[in-house]
Amino acid sequence: MYNAVLWDMDGTLVDSEPLWEIATYELSESLGRRITPEFRARTIGGTFQNTLQLCADFAGVSVSAEQAEQLQRQMFTRMHELLSTRLELRPGIEKLLSELANSGTPMMLVTNTARELADPAIEAIGRDFFTSTICGDEVANGKPNPEIYRTAALRLGFQPDQCLAFEDSPTGMASATAAGCRVVGLPERGEVPAEALDMRDLHGSTSFLGVTAADLAAWYAAFDN
């Protein structure tokens, strides 16, 4: 039986990736060249610094520290606008979180998103569901580095392999698996690492509709098979 559940936020708990897509395309256009969908996919689950570097490299430009700060403020302002008007929870999540919280399961939200942008989304999801939350600007190294997941597990008082983590992006899955968590991947497309389980195999889809706490226990146990 798992001791805790660690949740990625964007694309896992909330359907925010389409909103990040809008803001990322706009960021790339401000640098002079709109990135392709393939390049956009490489930004999913990453930090702002990673996204900015990919967009700058694609446009063939360099960005000063002062410009980077201005662009981050511009993107965060746009995301505030989008999150306040368009954010939706993924189907089935609220019911599952309620069941887990009512059973006393420790849960932590683990996101690469900076705190100032994560907080409005956390409030929309329900802050009381989580024992604690940790954001990408609160660790030295964000995903795909394993630091954020190791930190999250230890804050709850457990080892990473005692935690079941849910991630939708390659960046996040790499972080959680490298930390030693048992990871269920729910990518919109593509594969999951060999160390993780694919929710499409476990549940037939990446939707949380119909998923229960008992399912999570069975999925955690499946790593020992």
Image (spheres, rainbow, N blue to C red):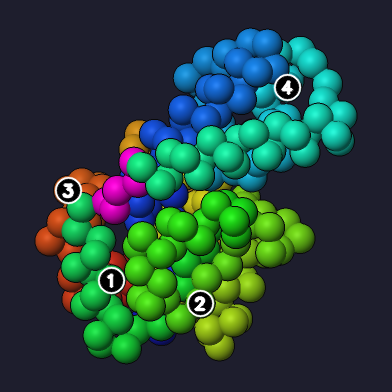
Going by the numbered disc 1, the residue's amino acid type is: Leu
The percent position of residue 209, horizontal first and vertical second, equals 15, 56
The quarter of the picture where the N terminus appears is bottom left
Task: Tell me which label, 4 or 2, sits earlier in the chain.
Answer: 4
Label 3 to label 1, Cα distance in Å? 20 Å
> Where is residue 62, by image quadrant?
top right
Upstream in sequence: badge 4 or badge 1: 4
Q: Earlier in the sequence, mark 3 or mark 1?
A: 1
Magenta stretch encompasses residue 87: yes
Dot 2 or dot 1, earlier in sequence: 1
User: Is disc 3 placed on a helix, strand or loop?
Assistant: loop
Q: Which mark is residue 132?
A: 2
Q: Quadrant of residue 26?
A: top right
Vertical comparison of 8 with 40: above or below: below
User: Where does the image place residue 80, in percent across and percent down from the top left?
Assistant: 50, 44
Label located before the other in sequence (3 or 4): 4
State which quarter of the image contains the C terminus: bottom left
Proximity of marks 2 and 3: CB atoms separated by less than 8 Å = no
- In the image, taking residue 95 as reference, residue 128 lies left or right, namely right
Res. 204 mark: 3
How far apart are the two marked residues, 3 and 4, measured between alpha carbons? 38 Å
Cα separation, mark 2 vs mark 1, equals: 14 Å
Q: CA distance from mark 4 to mark 1?
A: 39 Å
Magenta stretch, residue numbers: 86-90
The residue that mark 4 highlights is 56
- What x and y, as percent, mark residue 161? 50, 75
Which of these two is toward me, 202 or 58?
A: 58
Q: Is residue 168 visible?
A: no
Residue at screen point 69% across, 64% down: 138
